[in-house]
Amino acid sequence: MKTSALDDLFDRHPISRPFVSWGVTVISVLLCLMVLPTRLPGMELAGIGPNWLLIWVVAWSVKRTMFQGAMAGLILGLLQDGMTSPFPTHAVSLVLVGVLTARLQKQRYIEEDFISVALIVFGMAVLAETVTAIQFSLQGGRSLVEIWTYHQFIALSSAILSSLWAPIVYFPLNRWWERMGLVDSV
């Protein structure tokens, strides 16, 4: 069996394995945070871009417990709130996404592949945008008709784009986490 240079490094320095593994995870979150406000050609639909943090939370939560999914959603939601306005908070929707995604996998309603992950991301993007619209409704100041009409447009655009871009985040991260032993192979 052929070993890679990375495997050789980990064999010689086993203490480096968790640091490298978690370093890649943190860097992937930072990349998602940096690309979140970016609107490159082909990555937007009528001014709406993919929800990169939601995609990351789904990728993380697919093979983890509900608690781990909730913690990832909370941390990434708070990071997104730090980049934007704290109200409406993104933490609530991303925690819900993390918990429900982990619950779907635990119940074995899905088989893990690109299409099922894209479908999960599509549904979770609609759910996350609905949670945001509910928060706007509770805040007041705008008419409910305006909020819910605009919500349909945003939710559908975000869901389409996020589901199309989901494999770009999911595949390399999932392969890395499996290789490092951070998830149990299903």
Image (cartoon, rainbow, N blue to C red):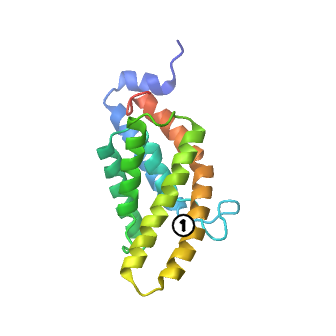
Placement of 37 over or under 166, stated as above or below: below
Name the residue rendered at 37%, 78% in the picture: 138
Closer to us: 134 or 67: 134
Q: Which residue is mark 1?
A: 37
Q: Which residue lies most toward the bottom here? A: 141
Q: 128 left or right of 72?
A: right
For label 1, the SS is: loop
Q: Is residue 82 visible?
A: yes
Q: Quarter of the image for the C terminus: give it.
A: top left
User: Amino acid under label 1?
Assistant: Pro
Q: 146 left or right of 14?
A: right
Q: Quadrant of residue 65?
A: top left
How far across and down, in percent of the image, does residue 165 sit? 60, 51
Q: Quadrant of residue 168?
A: top right
Q: Quadrant of residue 96?
A: bottom left
How far across and down, in percent of the image, does residue 116 sit? 55, 40
Placement of 117 over or under 2, stated as above or below: below
